[in-house]
Amino acid sequence: MRSSSMRNVLRLLDHIGSVLSVLALVLIYNHVTKKHEIGELKRLQNLWQKEVSTKSSAPQDDNKKIMGKIAVQVWSNVCGGKLSNLLNSPFFPRFFDELYFISNTRIQLNRSNYGQRAFGYLHPPETGYYKFVLYSDDGSEFWFGANESLASLKLAASVAMRDHVGSAPVGEIRFDSQISDDFLLERGNKYPLEIIHLQGTDADFVELHWIRPGKHYLEVITSEYISHSAELRLVSQIEFSKASSDSQLKVTKPYLVSFLTDSTVERTLPTCSYTLPTATMPNIPRFHGYKAIQEIIRVTNNDRKWQDNVEAKLVVNLFMAGLEKVFPKKYLVERVLTLERMATKQENNAVLYFLEIELSCDALDYTERVAEYVYLQKNEVGKNSQEKNVQLCYPRDLGWKKEISVHLIIAVDREGQRLHRFIKRVEQIVRESLEVDFQLVIVHSGKSGLDVERTLQATSLQKYKVEKLNGEFSLMRAINSGVGLVRSSQSIVLTSDVHTDLPADIFENCRKHCIEGKMIFAPVLFGLNCGAYPAEPHGSWDDQGYQTIGIYKSDWDRLGGMDKGTADHSATRDLMDRILSSGLHVARLKTENLFRLFYPKPRDLNVT
């Protein structure tokens, strides 16, 4: 770098040019219709300047640069017009849909509802002070480095705040933040740049202009001044402090609390006879059997307010009374994690529940939990909930297996980046939940553009199987093929797809609601609207969707799996018909943090 005295000389030599540059900008300022507070850009720079890895700060070998173009990544199906919708997308910045190259800093795709990131290096033609101006529809940001290290990237200009919809046509300055500070750049050096842009509807463009030393006008940066590296860094080095589904894993994790020993649980309550009812389907046409399924009611999952709930208080107190008889003054209720009232016929005032509570023990410095099905039998309940005509018992042959293996079956055709993101999410879940009895099974068409085997090998996942489906791709065939790769009939298969965002407790939740020969798991997913994401969900419950089903492999085999003669769009509806006809009970439950990611052309098996 040059000495400070040389900097002063350069500043004096460039003073006249800078003044004329400002005069040129004054003409543009005449179009300003709304002023923002002075210093807004500096505030944004301080807010969003982030650290990057030490590795990324090392300069690249100039021999690996490719002059004349910069790279552009595209994320499709990003809605809303706010830049924050792109930055908070679960697919940004790692899992983009397209990659192409441009020869100047003018970008226009003539599309709607997408986001993009252009990145590369700037090569100044001469030493001096440079100024940049950003235009776009909708919002955008320009990040620039003070030297060739990616660690020097900072926000230099922007169109609209991230949480607001805004635009700035070429030639108009609608935001003070569109204009950058002066940058002293040296000929022979290269400087990293990134442009982040979100397009909603209407006009579609983003342009970065500059004023070079001694020039008095704005112009697009052309090919002779830009480059990209032969070793593309496909993930932005800028940390956007985005919210993500990671936050779900930072809250209290009840699924990590160890279970009370089976011998202790068994001694707490007596065993009683119970038969799960089967949903009847009189005069219901084919593919509509799901309409006879009733959802499980979550009575409470609030560990602090359960005592204000009469129903929850009755069940918990009866269970603790049984525990107290066997182990006097040993256990106390720490939290009621959930109490679910199963969707069954209430005969003789009898109700089936799934109860999960966390207990403290006077002899231990850690908590334990109980998660069991309990059956409440009562005649007439008086004011005293502990009267003798109320009994809580374990329903015979209705226990779930805590260590049964779960095989997650995924079928994918062309959605390579969604599959990549799904794999990383599963890896995170397995790591955070300490899951060991799990295997990922992927059946794909070979057209996803992703090397599935290599992607899996780069993860920490130890148990997985991959199969390429020959012939014409069909989701029904792919799922059947995936289940066929599971050898043990004494295990659970869980079907899902790459458009699903799974919660950390999905595998344990599946085990709780699958009982061989008796019960299958069909959770209700929360469908996210366009522009919504798991950390800030907006959407609605998909009450008619059956994209995710957990079932014992033995029951799947007995049913014959997906019907080969049924079209993909009706396959799961047909499967639900046969599940109900076979006498299996369907545990249908609105499941927290189980999301259906927005996708404009869903490939659900149950779309009618």
Image (cartoon, rainbow, N blue to C red):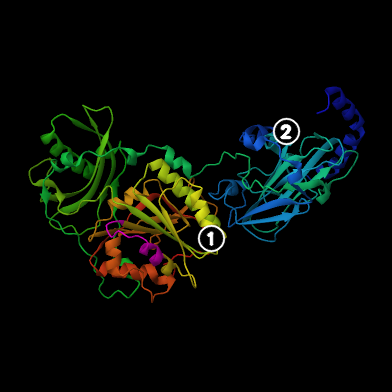
Identify residue for label 2. Answer: 38
Identity, as a three-letter code, of the amino acid under mark 2: Ile
Which residue is label 1 attached to? 415
Query: Distance between the Cα atoms at labels 1 and 2?
Result: 45 Å
Where is the N terminus found, in terms of image quarters? top right
Q: Which mark is residue 443?
A: none
Percent across and percent down for residue 36 are: 71, 38
**Among the two numbered marks 1 and 2 on one chain, the one whose residue lies closer to the N terminus:** 2
The image quadrant of residue 428 is top left
Residue type at tag 1: Glu
Query: Can residue 529 be seen here?
Result: no
Between 312 and 459, the residue placed more toward the observer is: 459
Q: Is residue 7 above or below residue 506?
A: above
Q: Magenta span covers which residues?
A: 479-491
**Foreground tag (1 vs 2):** 1
Closer-to-camera residue (235/383): 235
Taking depth in this image into account, of 490 and 216 the one nearest to the observer is 490
Up/down of 598 relative to 178, above or below: below
